Image (cartoon, rainbow, N blue to C red):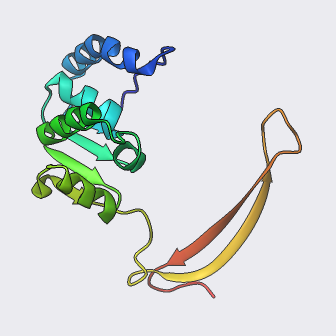
Amino acid sequence: MYHILWWPPVKQVGYPAALPRIRRLVKRISPDVLHSHYAISYGVLGALTGFRPHVIGAWGSDILITPGASKLRWAVLVRALRRADLITSLSGQITRVLIERGVPGEKIETIPFGVDTQLFVLVGIRTVTQTSTSFVPEDSITFTMWLFCSGRCPK
């Protein structure tokens, strides 16, 4: 896995500026698959490399929020998505929007986050508070863990 760190002051300018570097890297490593996460930015860049097979991951805000009402953003995004060999979507809602915008449904795999409660049983819920490692010692994070198991579950 390779990560290209490119954080210019203006991202919209920086993405096209990164394209030659990305093309060189893709050519040098010759991956089996190019998988671009976040469709509106890295998905478009991945499509512009011309490399195949190309998978684009649609995460949510990249489809449901960021393009907004901009016809130009939608045109660029849909063109990149149509060029992809496969699109992974995190929800039925994202998949429906992609299809409504003209992306062929046969290119989309909907793979939601979560737990299939037909296969896994909830065995407990625990709330944990952890002190943050930030500069502010009073900061703490509270999160809830839902514990699932399949087969023989502990009691």
Residue 152: % across, % down: 49, 86
Residue 116: % across, % down: 40, 76
Residue 64: % across, % down: 37, 50
| The quarter of the displayed image where residue 15 is located | top left
Which residue, as the protein is rendered here, is positioned at the far right?
Answer: 138
Relative vertical location of residue 122 with respect to residue 96 in this rendering, above or below:
below
| The quarter of the displayed image where residue 122 is located | bottom right
Which of these two is toward me, 131 or 6? 6
Q: Is residue 112 visible?
A: yes
Relative vertical location of residue 137 with respect to residue 103 in this rendering, above or below:
above
Query: Which residue sits at x=39%, y=51%?
Result: 60
Q: Is residue 33 visible?
A: no
| The quarter of the displayed image where residue 153 is located | bottom right
Relative vertical location of residue 30 with respect to residue 70 in this rendering, above or below:
above
Report whether 108 appears left or right of 127.
Answer: left
Q: Quadrant of the N terminus?
A: top left
